């Protein structure tokens, strides 16, 4: 079997044991390639475990900048005997296996159609280090050193990363550099270097940045003016609240008084988290919580109250696989309906769908504005794939001239001047009423907030017409929301296309790649990326202007499609679902295969023409 | 939650307090609770306490959960903002509200179902977090709105109106509050306004988590023979440990009232207000948390209902102190105070390449 040849376009997968210190070494590997100007897209595949279970780290090296998961493995770094069989099996024919050859393995453990590269890592480390912890930790750096020689990664890029990481810690810096060269030197002298897959310096990274969606969303909350964060630990959202705390300690401490312009409460559960956010929002502070599916389930009673009592609330839902505990460390887009209709009674909520960390930042800040403008819960629907993986994205940007939109707040001055105040009075016809904050005026503007029905002046009322008027106004408010949420983005095909495709959230990088691949195969697709619910009218127009529209989702039940049919009146016969829900991020290969299969059935273009 | 508006006519000679309000200005809508309900007496005590304390009504935020007790914030302080939230979840909503604006007085009203059953978790964690609030449980041992089921504070062996005996042991919220770190813990009786009003005043000026468990008989479902939460039972078994005079002097003013030595203990609070505890139980020390816990358990075993100011920490800390939050209320901060700006963001971008 001919070895795979590729420059700046291959996938390396590391199979490790959780808790062995491999994560930072693997990230070092990915970052060093980035420093050579070649885009990478790494992904953690990890168990619900702290130590001992298998964990993988997949790095896609992609000069063309395709940041979705590709599928398939060209080079497997097999460091975990527990998963040896499946790891070896996963390698593409002609691919490479790098392993620790300290203990000899029988021939039956290998494959004939792959290149095997053995290196006695344990032996090298045992003879170099005496401390067991060092033997383990430096083993990771030693294999990174070996890989740098095998793949022609510039060692200077790695050394620079070390010097940034261990600034002021010379001893650590030296020992890491030493371990790196230990691996490099062994590979250079004992192994066939370089392989036919390699990295070549390029200029394809530009000024893009490399960060996790959860950190970006946390920064969005800092920039968007959130002062109260209440949360309960749950994978994959915990790192969001922790990042908010960290960034606030850096950016939100009053320089004079040394006091905090933020409050983070790790609550006793998700009910309390959302309760704290509701209380803070009611009282005029920007507040948010970060959670995942099970947390949303627990919060739904409060979400209904916030909808009906009209209280600004921002919820970042880092989605994972459900239902129940589901797949807590895997990704999905399976809370779309649960969030769109969260709570009992007739409720509908605003959802934002970020595609990457940059939009996690933008949309979290935007959600805080929207929540106050619309006086309602707003969900930022990210997921584990965006949230917990370091992703290359456009640099974060902020317009300093832009003020926060505090929405319709009745001031002391206006009350004093005799302005009419009805908490649920639609004075502007947009469904949004004015609110007062507690303590605004001694005798005017006070009102009683309740989840029970009320009239326009917030007086308790069980009268049917009062109830209906209020519910109708909430619908008008939802229409107003349509005009305020991020608009969908059209990715037109190079030539007029019969097929449409709708996608959202973390499907984005795989979709962009799939569209190119489909175009190469002569299948032209106009694609529309939905960025928010309620749906803008152009989404309906898009569906109506294509005989068939693929809806690509990462859930079993075609949840966004359901929402399109239910809420936008789209003819469901036009919609063809492409669904991926095994917990791994969707790939371009999968999308291409599914669309091509359906396109074959639905197209009038002769099959021969497509394949020619 | 009433359809009936209260007449606004005031008697011209009604007394005005230091901030210019009559007692009527602290009233709310007409109660829709049953005639004789203990809860209405508590509302009246809150009105009295706020008027006497010269609290501006709009500087109070009243929050509650769901149930008969949680309806009452509509019946006092009509010009204050109120929030009738979710069953058992008032503590979290109050915590959030308090974080948003530390300058208001937060009055949480709850019931025994709301705090000891569905909301026992939030009750506990609100106390643990030392939220600066007055937390009043209007405790009648029974579910009123749903017509007479036992609540978790009903004493073991007590009987419902229909003669059913409660087998479950009771939750003692006062004991819990003491154990969980509340810095002001009291118990009172809705039928004893002379004890309750000064306790509420003292709780309002206490800058930490202040909890008052008020036994408040339910005339509809829990005021019969065999109940341990009836007017008659509580009057017969009430064992006050102290009587409180609440004197509020701003720090710089001279204290001008004299008390006889011996039976009176003065507690100067953080803001300069002074509580004078007339000791009724000779060996009771309201500064001794562990002693209070023991005393309560011993007397409970004898069937007594211990009331009074059971524990107070004169130098409490609250959640804002723990979180080192800024003095300026969060809800008044704008982009200028909160947004680090584009230059800082550029630095962050640079560190991520």
Image (cartoon, rainbow, N blue to C red):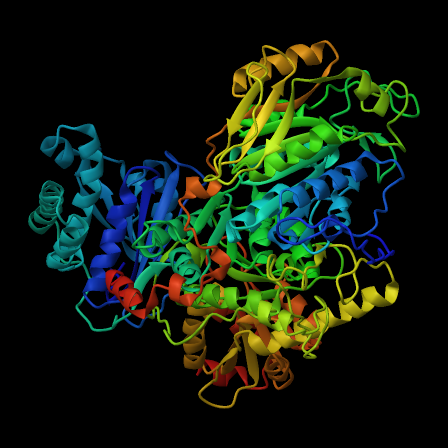
Q: On the image, which quarter does residue B222 sit in? A: top right
Is B286 rendered above or below residue A272? above
Q: Residue at x 90, y 33 (%)?
A: B220
- In the image: residue B342, left or right of residue A375: left
Q: Observer-nearest residue: B241 or B62?
A: B241
Q: Position of residue B339 (x, y in %)?
A: 38, 64
Q: Observer-nearest residue: A528 or B76?
A: B76
Q: Residue at x 68, y 64 (%)?
A: A444
- In the image: residue A24, left or right of residue A497: left
- In the image: residue A511, left or right of residue B43: left
Q: Residue at x 87, y 24 (%)?
A: B160
Q: Residue at x 85, y 58 (%)?
A: A462
Q: Position of residue A83 (x, y in %)?
A: 37, 40
Q: On the image, which quarter does residue A138 sit in? A: top left
Q: Position of residue A270 (x, y in %)?
A: 57, 45
Q: Observer-nearest residue: A237 or A68?
A: A237
Q: Specify whether residue A600 is in view.
A: no
């Amino acid at each position: 079997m001919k070895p795979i040849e590729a420059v700046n376009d291959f996938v390396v997968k590391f199979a490790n044991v959780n808790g062995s210190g491999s994560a930072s070494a693997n990230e070092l590997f990915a970052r060093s390639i980035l420093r050579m100007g070649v885009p990478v897209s790494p992904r953690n595949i990890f168990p619900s475990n702290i130590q001992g279970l298998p964990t993988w780290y997949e790095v896609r090296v992609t000069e063309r900048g395709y940041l979705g998961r590709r599928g398939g493995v060209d080079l497997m770094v097999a460091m975990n005997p527990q998963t040896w069989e499946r790891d070896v099996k996963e390698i593409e024919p002609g691919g490479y296996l790098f392993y620790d050859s300290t203990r000899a393995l029988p021939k039956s453990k290998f494959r004939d159609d792959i290149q095997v590269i053995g290196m006695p890592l344990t032996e090298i480390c045992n003879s170099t280090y005496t401390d067991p912890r060092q033997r383990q930790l430096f083993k990771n750096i030693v294999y990174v050193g070996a890989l740098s020689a095998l793949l022609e990664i510039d060692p200077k890029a790695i050394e620079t990363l070390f010097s940034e990481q261990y600034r002021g810690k010379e001893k650590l810096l030296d020992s890491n550099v030493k371990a790196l060269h230990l691996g490099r030197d062994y590979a250079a002298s004992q192994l066939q270097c370089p392989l036919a897959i390699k990295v070549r310096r390029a200029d394809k990274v530009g000024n893009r940045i490399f960060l996790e969606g959860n950190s970006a969303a946390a920064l969005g909350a800092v920039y968007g003016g959130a002062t109260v964060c209440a949360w309960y630990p749950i994978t994959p959202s915990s790192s969001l609240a922790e990042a908010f705390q960290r960034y606030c300690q850096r950016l939100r401490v009053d320089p004079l008084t040394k006091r905090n312009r933020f409050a983070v409460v790790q609550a006793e559960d998700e009910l309390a988290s959302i309760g704290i956010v509701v209380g803070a929002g009611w009282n005029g502070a920007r507040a948010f919580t970060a959670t995942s599916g099970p947390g949303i389930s627990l919060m739904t009673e409060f979400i209904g109250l916030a909808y009906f009592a009209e209280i600004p609330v921002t919820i970042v839902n880092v989605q994972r696989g459900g239902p129940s505990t589901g797949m807590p460390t895997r990704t999905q887009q399976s809370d779309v309906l649960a969030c769109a209709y969260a709570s009992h009674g007739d409720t509908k909520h605003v959802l934002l769908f970020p595609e990457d960390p940059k939009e996690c930042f933008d949309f979290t800040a935007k959600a805080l504005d929207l929540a106050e403008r619309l006086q309602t819960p707003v969900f930022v629907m990210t997921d584990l794939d965006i949230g917990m993986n370091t992703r290359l994205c456009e640099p974060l940007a902020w317009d300093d001239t832009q003020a926060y939109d505090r929405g319709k707040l009745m001031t002391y001055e206006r009350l004093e001047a005799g302005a009419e105040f009805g908490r649920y009075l639609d004075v502007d016809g947009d469904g949004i009423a004015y609110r007062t904050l507690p303590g605004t005026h001694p005798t005017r503007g006070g009102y009683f907030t309740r989840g029970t029905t009320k009239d326009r002046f917030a007086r308790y009322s069980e009268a049917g017409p009062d109830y209906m008027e209020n519910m109708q106004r909430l619908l008008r408010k939802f229409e107003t929301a349509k005009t305020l949420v991020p608009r969908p983005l059209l990715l037109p095909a190079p030539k007029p296309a019969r097929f449409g495709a709708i996608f959202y959230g973390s499907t984005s990088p795989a979709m962009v790649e799939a569209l190119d691949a489909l175009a190469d195969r002569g299948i032209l697709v106009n694609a529309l990326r939905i960025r928010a619910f309620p749906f803008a009218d152009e989404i309906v127009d898009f569906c109506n202007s294509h005989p068939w529209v693929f809806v690509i989702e990462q859930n079993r039940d075609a949840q966004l499609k359901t929402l399109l049919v239910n809420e936008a009146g789209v003819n469901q016969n036009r919609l063809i679902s492409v669904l991926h829900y095994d917990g791994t991020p969707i790939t371009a290969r999968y999308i291409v295969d599914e669309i091509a299969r359906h396109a074959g059935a639905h197209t009038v273009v002769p099959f021969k023409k497509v394949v020619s | 939650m009433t359809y009936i508006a209260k007449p606004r006519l005031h008697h011209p000679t009604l007394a005005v307090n230091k901030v210019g309000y009559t007692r009527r200005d602290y009233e709310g809508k007409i109660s829709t609770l049953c005639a004789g309900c203990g809860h209405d007496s508590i509302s009246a005590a809150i009105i009295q306490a706020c008027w006497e304390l010269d609290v501006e009504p709009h500087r109070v935020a009243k929050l509650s959960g769901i149930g008969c007790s949680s309806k009452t914030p509509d019946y006092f302080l009509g010009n204050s903002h109120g929030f009738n939230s979710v069953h058992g979840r008032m503590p979290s909503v109050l915590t959030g509200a308090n974080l948003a604006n530390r300058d208001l007085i937060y009055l949480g009203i709850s019931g025994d179902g709301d705090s000891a059953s569905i909301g026992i978790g939030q009750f506990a964690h609100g106390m643990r977090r030392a939220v600066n609030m007055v937390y009043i449980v209007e405790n009648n041992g029974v579910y009123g709105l749903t017509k007479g089921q036992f609540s978790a504070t009903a004493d073991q062996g007590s009987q419902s109106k229909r003669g059913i005996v409660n087998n479950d042991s009771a939750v003692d919220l006062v004991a819990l509050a003491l154990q969980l770190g509340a810095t002001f813990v009291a118990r009172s009786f809705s039928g004893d306004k002379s004890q309750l009003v000064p306790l509420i005043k003292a709780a309002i000026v206490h800058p930490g988590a202040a909890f008052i468990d008020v036994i408040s008989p339910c005339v509809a479902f829990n005021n019969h023979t065999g109940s341990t939460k009836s007017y008659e039972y509580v009057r017969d078994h009430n064992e006050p440990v102290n009587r409180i005079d609440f004197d509020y002097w701003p720090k710089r003013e001279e204290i001008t009232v004299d008390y006889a030595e011996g039976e009176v203990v003065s507690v100067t609070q953080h803001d300069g207000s002074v509580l004078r505890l007339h000791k009724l139980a000779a060996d009771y020390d309201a500064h001794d948390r562990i002693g209070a816990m023991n005393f309560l358990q011993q007397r409970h075993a004898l069937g007594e209902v211990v009331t009074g100011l059971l524990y107070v920490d004169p130098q409490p800390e609250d959640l804002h102190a723990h979180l080192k939050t800024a003095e300026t209320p969060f809800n008044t901060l704008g982009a200028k105070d909160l947004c680090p700006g584009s230059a800082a963001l550029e630095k962050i971008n640079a560190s991520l390449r």
